[in-house]
Image (tube, rainbow, N blue to C red):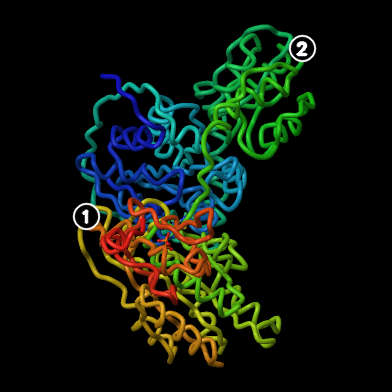
């Protein structure tokens, strides 16, 4: 045993490795992504990025059926995508243990919504464990594998941003050496969920969860810390840390297994305190279940939106603690921006000029919604933009002069855009679909994907040929364009939106952060600049307006992509060396 500092995500990876996991599989999504990336660095584990979370869980189901332990990772919205296999895997149960890390994002630091993944527990009848720190993330991941195999059910480990991304001291141990799985023996009653088998497995699932609830009541991981009996708090996950800091004298019931709940212990705890309150983030999950159990829960105004903090918890109980907001207030604001040299920029610049209705999607390109580009009208969930473009056309939009365009990134297209495109092709729809192929899953930190073929284990495998894929759907108009050729971007978009048939434009150029060698930066020739503002409208962080209205570039930020040179009608943007010679910046 030795001690080390690990983030919650690193600790989950380490816990899975110590538990003898054979395979890790998932789809990137903040705040879960680094878990698999860390597992890859450990010995004797094979890791894969799946095209989406549903496929990840299905691969895991196969690993489990084959008798080996498997870790699946995703962010909260990923489980919406993977829910179909989850519900039925609860019926089949497992061979080797299945542990699913779901990382929630209260406060939506990097997500389109706030979801509380504890709800999957009672919904799908799968146990949920909630670590409060890195140490518990490791320990509970290990126990999750044991619970999964002992009670024949997949287990969810629910993290949140603060746990996934904070570092804490962890005791690391050895890896259990598991034997190679025995050859597979068919067991259709367990694995083939025809209705007749599923009915039996449904009964069996209820029995398994009953047994688990009994185990939770006698040997479960929940913890009671008695302090003053005037106030008792029921809490879980990182909120436990906030409660300890904000209400040091209160008695605390720390829920670790949030499904199935240890009902008897909760009732006993409630009886042992004068007043009982719940502190939890996101949904009133515990509050609702405690009230359903007949426990009198005080109405305390703990915020139900966003992230909690020790200060917010203290305030809810009439106390005060210094708020971290005061520290944050001193930091300069850094709004999210497309990077200098981002290949997505020119496409939104052109879409704005085309006055298109843009049904967008999720990725770095969602920043095209922000000024000065302001060229995205919707962003709902991964893959939604393509189906929404078709739906807008069905509603009769697009006829009054504003063309309908769907915009989607390469990873998002592989995740859930292909089916949307198949839908339009199959139903005879029209419209223009733009695939922004920057050869990487950029937004979550440069993960490989099936479009470019680099695997999580570092192998270069097959790449999907987007043009051929579209052609196989019977789409006649498919073109690939370099997004740094602004003339081609504008003219191709103009031509394709003018058609009354379905067309696809693939804008293909690598993410600016993949390019290690910077091109020569550009600077502004002050004499030639007329302060027209055309370059400013690109929204490049390397270009700004001076007090006199003319443009200036920051040559330490400029990567020399040349997009701004192409929008300047006065040849005022020139290689930085030349600008210095003629007296520019
Ligand atoms: C269901 C779901 N899974 C994961 C995510 C996290 N996520 C948001 S966008 C994205 C991929 C973006 O990659 P790409 O489409 O290639 O666009 P890029 O960022 O490279 O421009 C991911 C993984 C999410 N929002 N929803």
**Residue drawn at (35%, 61%), measured in percent from left and top?**
523
In the picture provided, is 17 more to the left or to the right than 566? left
Residue 513 lies in what quarter of the image? Answer: bottom left
**Ligand 1 appears in which quadrant?**
bottom left
Q: Nearest to the eye among marks 2 and 1: give it.
A: 1
Residue 134 lies in what quarter of the image? Answer: top left
Q: Nearer the viewer, residue 467 or 17?
A: 467
Q: Nearer the viewer, residue 183 or 61?
A: 61
Q: Nearer the viewer, residue 506 or 457?
A: 506
The image's mark for residue 28 is: none
The reply to whether the C-beta atoms of the residues labelled 2 and 1 are less than 8 Å apart is no
Q: Dot 2 corresponds to which residue?
A: 274
How many labels, in total?
2
Q: Position of residue 177 (x, y in %)?
A: 22, 34
Q: Position of residue 110 (x, y in %)?
A: 52, 48
Quadrant assignment for the N terminus: top left
Decide: is 318 above or below 369: above
Residue 214 visible in rendering: no
Query: Tag 1 or tag 2, which sits nearer the N-term?
Result: 2
In the picture provided, is 280 more to the left or to the right than 459? right
Decide: is 119 above or below 343: above
- Mark 2 burial class by Cα count in 10 Å: few <14, some 14-19, many 20+: few
**Residue drawn at (59%, 76%), measured in percent from left and top?**
389
How far apart are the two marked residues, 2 and 1, measured between alpha carbons? 58 Å
Q: Position of residue 189 (x, y in %)?
A: 44, 56
Asked which secondary structure carries label 2, the reply is: loop
> Going by the picture, which residue comes out furthest to the top?
228
Q: Dot 1 corresponds to which residue?
A: 458
Quadrant assignment for the C terminus: bottom left
**Residue drawn at (58%, 73%), measured in percent from left and top?**
358
């Amino acid at each position: 045993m030795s001690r080390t500092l690990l983030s919650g995500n690193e600790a989950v990876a380490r816990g899975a490795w110590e538990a003898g996991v054979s395979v890790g599989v998932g789809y990137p999504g903040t705040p879960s992504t680094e878990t698999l990336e860390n597992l890859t660095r450990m010995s004797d584990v094979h890791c894969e990025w799946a095209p989406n979370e549903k496929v990840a869980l299905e691969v895991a189901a196969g690993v489990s059926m084959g008798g080996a332990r498997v870790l699946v990772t995703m962010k909260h919205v990923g489980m919406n995508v993977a829910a179909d296999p989850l519900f039925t895997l609860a019926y089949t149960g497992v061979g080797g243990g299945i542990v699913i890390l779901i990382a929630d994002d209260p406060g939506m630091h990097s997500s389109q919504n706030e979801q509380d993944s504890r709800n999957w527990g009672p919904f799908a009848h799968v146990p949920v464990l909630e670590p409060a720190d890195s140490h518990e993330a490791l320990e509970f991941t290990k126990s999750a594998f044991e619970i999964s195999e002992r009670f024949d059910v997949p287990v969810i480990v629910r993290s949140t941003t603060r746990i996934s991304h904070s570092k804490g001291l962890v005791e690391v141990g050895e890896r259990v050496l598991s034997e190679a799985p025995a050859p597979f023996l068919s067991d259709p009653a367990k694995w083939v969920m025809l209705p007749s088998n599923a009915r039996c497995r449904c009964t069996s699932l209820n029995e398994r969860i009953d047994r688990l609830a009994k185990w939770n009541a006698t040997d479960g991981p929940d913890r009671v810390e008695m302090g003053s009996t005037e106030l008792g708090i029921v809490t879980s996950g990182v909120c436990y840390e906030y409660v300890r800091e904000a209400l040091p004298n209160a008695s605390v019931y720390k829920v670790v297994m949030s499904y199935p709940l240890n009902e008897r212990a909760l009732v006993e705890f409630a009886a042992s305190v004068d007043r009982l309150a719940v502190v939890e983030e996101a949904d009133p999950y515990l509050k609702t279940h405690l009230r359903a159990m007949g426990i009198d829960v005080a109405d305390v105004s703990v915020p139900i939106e966003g992230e909690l903090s020790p200060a917010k918890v203290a305030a809810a109980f009439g106390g005060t603690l210094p708020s971290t907001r005061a520290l944050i207030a001193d930091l300069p604001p850094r709004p999210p921006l497309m990077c200098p040299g981002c290949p997505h920029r020119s496409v939104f610049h052109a879409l704005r000029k085309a006055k298109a209705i843009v049904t967008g999607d999720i990725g770095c390109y969602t920043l095209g919604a922000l000024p000065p580009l302001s060229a995205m009208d919707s962003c709902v969930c991964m893959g939604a933009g393509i189906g929404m473009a078709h739906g807008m056309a069905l509603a009769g939009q697009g006829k009054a002069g504003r063309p309908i365009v769907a915009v989607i990134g390469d990873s998002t297209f592989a995740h859930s855009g292909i089916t949307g495109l198949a839908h339009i092709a199959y139903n005879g729809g029209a419209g223009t679909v733009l695939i922004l192929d920057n050869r990487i899953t950029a937004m979550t930190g440069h993960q490989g994907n099936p479009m470019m073929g680099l695997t999580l284990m570092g192998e270069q495998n097959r790449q999907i040929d987007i043009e051929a894929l579209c052609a196989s759907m019977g789409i006649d108009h498919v073109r690939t364009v370099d997004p740094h050729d602004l003339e081609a971007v504008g003219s191709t978009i103009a031509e394709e939106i003018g058609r009354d048939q379905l067309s696809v434009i693939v804008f293909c150029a690598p993410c600016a952060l993949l390019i290690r060698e910077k091109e020569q930066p550009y600077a502004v020739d002050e004499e030639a600049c007329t302060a027209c503002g055309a370059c400013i409208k690109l929204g490049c962080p390397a270009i700004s307006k001076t007090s006199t209205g003319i443009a200036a570039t920051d040559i330490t930020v400029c990567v020399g992509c040349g997009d701004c040179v192409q929008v300047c009608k006065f040849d005022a943007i020139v290689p930085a060396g030349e600008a210095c010679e003629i007296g520019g910046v």
